[in-house]
């Protein structure tokens, strides 16, 4: 099986479904260009039938971006597919992403239909889209909760109808990693024509398992992962692109690789956060403000001696600059001495002791001490001397 994992970015579609974070076309083009620079393989640019603005964004992104495949989402009907075909007219590489619910819950309570009818609608949608576009991805919505034998039947039928990629979404973020991985393995082992398509994983984060589930899928044979910058998306979000890229890079023993230029991860995270006016949580893996900040005395001492004592990722590899030693009331002498040296004060043992005592007094009244505070501190101990 090939090592290469295709990165399908859906920041501009599933990600943009976050309430209050809608982007205009200019902002979307800027992000799409940054995604191209990042090295993603597919950009899901929108859901063209949903609004004239979304349709127009797919058109303009198709003109502006030439390397990645541009993908447009549809439901399983001809009207949606016609709009997607039109919106993709300028795309150099194009893909239509069509699909329908696969769980009994969706079949009964969303479509008021039957398994047979829904499978036929999926097949018809793929056949119709295939008349216009060669690259067709099919999503079996709510696959995470679908009956596995029915799901396998559906996947086999849509591949026979022309699907080149089969997306197995855990739409509600329900699965455990073992369950999701087993689902992918079942499809690899039991769908006769599975070698004619790439299996894609699309996981939501309702239980905080989106990245773990996506990884379980890849380990079991999927070769495309659908993800977003900063893990944004419906409800609790989607699998986070930066996490998947760095897991694959950090764990070479998995035998997987992506085309991601990891040095762009922090810059694009900031761009998406600013454009959407959506803060990234400080402790977010890889791109959070604190991802490379050390504040407790024990850790600081270890990092100052040898960075890898407490860092498994080199911050430069993700475009985060260097590690930071944050000064708080939990910091030790090693950290204080290190930060003072950075601003030009080299203290002997006795002066450091005096400075540390004063430092703790200041740190108890302030959450974090900055360089300016350290200068004040040094002045105050000069006076005391
Ligand atoms: O979560 C989901 O099932 C989706 C599909 C539309 C692919 O976003
Ligand atoms: Zn989704």
Image: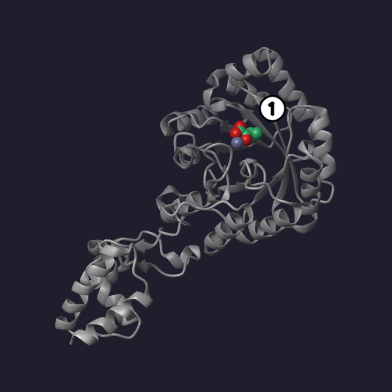
Q: State whether residue 257 is above or below residue 124.
A: below
Assess mark 1: CB under 8 A from ligand 1? no
Q: Which image quadrant is residue 195 in?
A: top right
Q: Which image quadrant is residue 250 in?
A: bottom left
**Along the viewing direction, whichever of 344 and 150 lies nearer the viewer:** 344
Q: Position of residue 144 (x, y in %)?
A: 53, 27
State the residue at coordinates (58%, 20%): 103
Relative horizontal placement of residue 182, taking residue 224 as reference (left or right): left
Q: Position of residue 150 (x, y in %)?
A: 59, 18
Relative horizontal placement of residue 232, taking residue 113 as reference (left or right): left
**Along the viewing direction, whichever of 301 and 219 lies nearer the viewer:** 301
Check disc 1: other Cα within 10 Å, few if <14, some if 14-19, many if 20+: many
Image quarter for ligand 1 equals top right
**Along the viewing direction, whichever of 151 and 1 lies nearer the viewer:** 151
**Along the viewing direction, whichever of 173 and 131 lies nearer the viewer:** 173
Q: Position of residue 243 (x, y in %)?
A: 48, 50
Q: Indicate the secondary structure of the residue bearing disc 1.
A: helix
Asked whether residue 167 is in view, the answer is no
Residue at the extreme left: 350
Q: State whether residue 18 is above or below residue 251.
A: above
Q: State whether residue 139 is above or below residue 283.
A: above
For the C terminus, the quadrant is: bottom left
């Amino acid at each position: 099986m090939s090592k290469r994992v295709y990165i399908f970015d859906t920041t501009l579609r599933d990600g943009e479904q976050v309430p209050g974070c809608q982007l205009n076309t200019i902002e979307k083009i800027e992000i799409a260009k940054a995604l191209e620079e990042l090295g993603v393989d597919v950009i899901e640019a929108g859901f063209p039938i949903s609004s004239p603005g979304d349709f127009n964004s797919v058109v303009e992104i198709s003109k502006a971006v030439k390397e990645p495949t541009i993908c447009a989402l549809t439901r399983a009907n001809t009207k949606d597919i016609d709009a997607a075909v039109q919106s993709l007219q300028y795309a150099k590489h194009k893909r239509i992403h069509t699909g329908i619910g696969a769980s009994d819950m969706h079949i009964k309570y969303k479509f008021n239909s039957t398994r047979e009818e829904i499978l036929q609608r999926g097949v018809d949608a793929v056949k119709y889209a295939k008349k216009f576009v060669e690259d067709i991805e099919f999503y079996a919505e709510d696959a995470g909760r679908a009956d596995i034998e029915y799901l396998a039947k559906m996947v086999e039928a849509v591949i026979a109808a022309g699907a080149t990629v089969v997306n197995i979404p855990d739409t509600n973020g329900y699965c455990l990693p073992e369950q999701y991985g087993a689902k992918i393995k079942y499809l690899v082992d039991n769908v006769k024509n599975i070698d004619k398509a790439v299996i894609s994983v699309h996981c939501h984060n309702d239980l905080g398992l989106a990245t773990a589930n996506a990884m379980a899928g890849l380990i079991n044979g999927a070769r495309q992962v659908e993800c977003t910058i900063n893990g944004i998306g419906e409800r609790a979000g989607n699998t986070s692109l930066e996490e998947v890229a760095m897991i694959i890079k950090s764990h070479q023993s998995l035998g997987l690789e992506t085309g991601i230029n990891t040095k762009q991860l922090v810059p694009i995270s900031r761009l998406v956060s600013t454009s959407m006016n959506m803060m990234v949580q400080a402790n977010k893996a890889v791109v959070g403000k604190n991802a490379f900040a050390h504040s407790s005395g024990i850790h600081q001492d270890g990092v100052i001696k040898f960075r890898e004592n407490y860092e498994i990722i080199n911050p430069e590899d993700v475009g985060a600059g260097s590690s930071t030693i944050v000064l708080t009331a939990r910091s030790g002498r090693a950290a204080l001495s290190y930060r003072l040296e950075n601003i030009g004060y080299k203290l002997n043992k006795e002066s450091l002791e005096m400075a540390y005592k004063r430092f703790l007094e200041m740190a108890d009244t302030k959450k974090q001490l900055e360089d300016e505070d350290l200068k004040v501190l040094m002045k105050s101990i000069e006076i005391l001397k």
